[in-house]
Image (spheres, grey):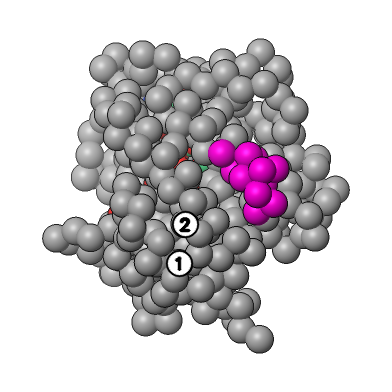
Amino acid sequence: MTRTALITGITGQDGAYLSQLLLEKGYTVHGTARPSSTDNFWRIAPFLDRLHIHRADLLDQGSLIRLLDRCQPDEVYNLAAMSYVPTSFEQPLLTGEVTALGVARMLEAIRIIKPDIRFYQASSSEMFGATKDQTQDETTAFHPRSPYGIAKCYGHWTTVNYREAYGIYGCSGILFNHESPLRGEQFVTRKITLAAARIKLGLQEKLFLGNLEARRDWGYAADYVQAMWQMLQQEEPSDYVIGTGQQHSVQQFAEMAFEKVGLDWKRYVEIDSSLLRPTDVVNLCGNAEKAKERLGWTPKVSCKELAEIMVEADLARLSPKDQSNVST
Ligand code: NDP
Ligand code: GDR
């Protein structure tokens, strides 16, 4: 029988990769988009006609209840969130409403409408924040460093609590940073790859960045949505860290991206102190042993390959057709 999935935040990076994966697996795929004057469907445009899009907002309990009643999904992937850390410092209460309470609203809707739904919560390595541990796994203590990280901790523990209190099949995927050509332009990897491509093509002169020393475990979004799906196929629900176990600094990512276009990053990157965060996270590196053992999940794309894929995609997007093979 055809399985039915609902993805909140289907218009985002992960929503696009996950919906593609689920369509390939034969699912009927429903997704939520916020009501707005301009639709943000560019990431899902290639297969939009195969998706069922509904207007719903994590801020609105009634819209979520009606949504579940209409779709009757077997699986819900809760990807919707205010996901940009700097904005969470500017709008901490809105971040809490969407990224924290939004999870409780979705789980309440599940409890009311269809408690046998399998639920995936998009948790984040930002929950580890100021951790002193060199690598982080499912047992590492949380010490969030932003309103976003704090909100994600609430969502994580709410998922755990609904599992323990009501027997809901809820999994919290603690995903480390994952990127792709579909990444939003404000996130540092895409900001860098887009700038490297633009500078190569003579469309931009400088790239302004904040903290070059911050270190992240960067993986490829297409690999990570596979793990989300695998978590919901297990007999018992559980929480999983997903990361590559490899760490690079923002500076190293810039080096790799500029190298791809044959340029020296030092000539183009400048520091803009207004991009520094009130509190930042500087040392994240995931230990995904549990996911490897129980799900058989391993990452396929290295950070260097990822930087290259992203630069290539940005070059292709920016290049007029007759210049599409700009020498790299
Ligand atoms: P994006 O920012 O690309 O997408 C976020 C999605 O949430 C968008 O579809 C957005 O809709 C939607 N959204 C925002 N506010 C609301 C709201 N009030 N009601 C309904 N929908 C809303 O994020 P990613 O795809 O990168 O990430 C997916 C999830 O995974 C997020 O929860 C993120 O916090 C989490 N995460 C991401 C990681 C990463 O490295 N990418 C790592 C760990 C966790 P709209 O198009 O209208 O703005
Ligand atoms: P992050 O991603 O905060 O880890 O959250 P982001 O790419 O925004 O920042 C990563 C690190 O780079 C440093 N940095 C800059 N960041 C941005 N955005 N712009 C800059 O110019 C810049 N210069 C340096 C930051 O200080 C930071 O240390 C992402 C989001 O997808 C979250 O939703 C997700 O939960 C986490 O990854 C895991």
Give coordinates of residue 123: x percent, y percent: 56, 40
Q: Secondary structure at mark 1?
A: helix
Most frequent secondary structure within the magenta stretch: helix
Which residue lies at the image location 23% right of the left edge and 60% below the top edge? 35
Left or right of 156, for residue 234: right
Which residue lies at the image location 30% right of the left edge and 29% below the top edge? 93
- Closer-to-camera residue (99/222): 99
Q: Kindly indicate the quadrant of the structure image that contains residue 101.
A: top left
Instruction: Please give the range of residues in magenta.
Output: 158-168
Q: Is residue 106 above or below residue 5?
A: above
- Is mark 2 in CB contact (under 8 Å) with mark 1? yes
Give coordinates of residue 171: x percent, y percent: 65, 49
Q: Secondary structure at mark 2?
A: helix
Q: Is residue 52 above or below residue 184?
A: below
| Alpha carbon distance from label 2 to label 1 | 7 Å
Q: Is residue 87 visible?
A: no
Tag shown at residue 109: 2
| Residue position marked by numbered label 1 in the rendering | 68
